Image: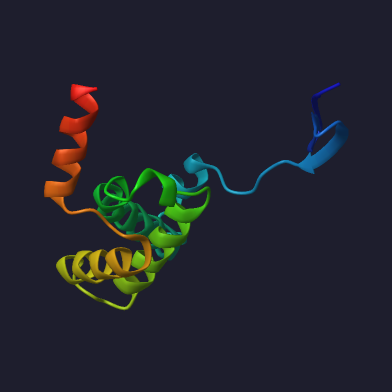
Amino acid sequence: MSGTIDELTYYEAFGQLLVKRKGGLSAEKVKRNKERYARRIKCAENFGKAAEILKPLYRRLPVEKRAHGLFGKLTGMANQMLYKGIAEKEVVKEMEEHLTKEYGLMSYEEMEALGKRRNNQ
């Protein structure tokens, strides 16, 4: 059984019937009242920028080091740096240093060599 009645949505997950209320903000509501939601918009833009910064670095992590939730955690770290006013180039540098130390971030040369080995197999 699943469906929506009034403000309640019924759905099945993990073998149980669950209920949730209808969500809060819609994109349309935010667009209509940009001044009221200016801070929320700015935070979302910053988080998007943090994810953009992190994406190429994350792809350089060894596959065995990537884990569920890691990208979000690292994006949050980059987001905090941007929020504090740290320049994007500095955020990239700091995140690169952190990922190298904590997760064995591969250099571009290592990535290229790995790609060549995979192609020759």
In this image, 12 relative to 78: left or right? right
Q: Residue at x 72, y 41 (%)?
A: 22
Q: Provide residue 38's location: percent of width, then percent of height.
A: 40, 62
Location of residue 31 with respect to 120 vertically, above or below: below
Q: Provide residue 34's location: percent of width, then percent of height.
A: 40, 55
Q: Which quarter of the picture shows residue 17?
A: top right
Q: Nearer the viewer, residue 19 or 17?
A: 17
Q: Provide residue 51's location: percent of width, then percent of height.
A: 34, 52
Q: Residue furthest front?
A: 121
Location of residue 111 with respect to 45 vertically, above or below: above
Q: Quadrant of the N terminus?
A: top right
Is residue 114 among what the camera can see? yes
In this image, 113 relative to 82: left or right? left
Total labels: the figure holds: 0
Q: Quadrant of the C terminus?
A: top left
Q: Nearer the viewer, residue 44 or 7?
A: 44
Location of residue 98 with respect to 75 vertically, above or below: below
Is residue 35 among what the camera can see? no
In this image, 61 relative to 69: left or right? left
Q: Nearer the viewer, residue 32 or 15?
A: 15
Q: Residue furthest left?
A: 109
Q: Residue at x 66, y 44 (%)?
A: 23
Q: Nearer the viewer, residue 1 or 121?
A: 121
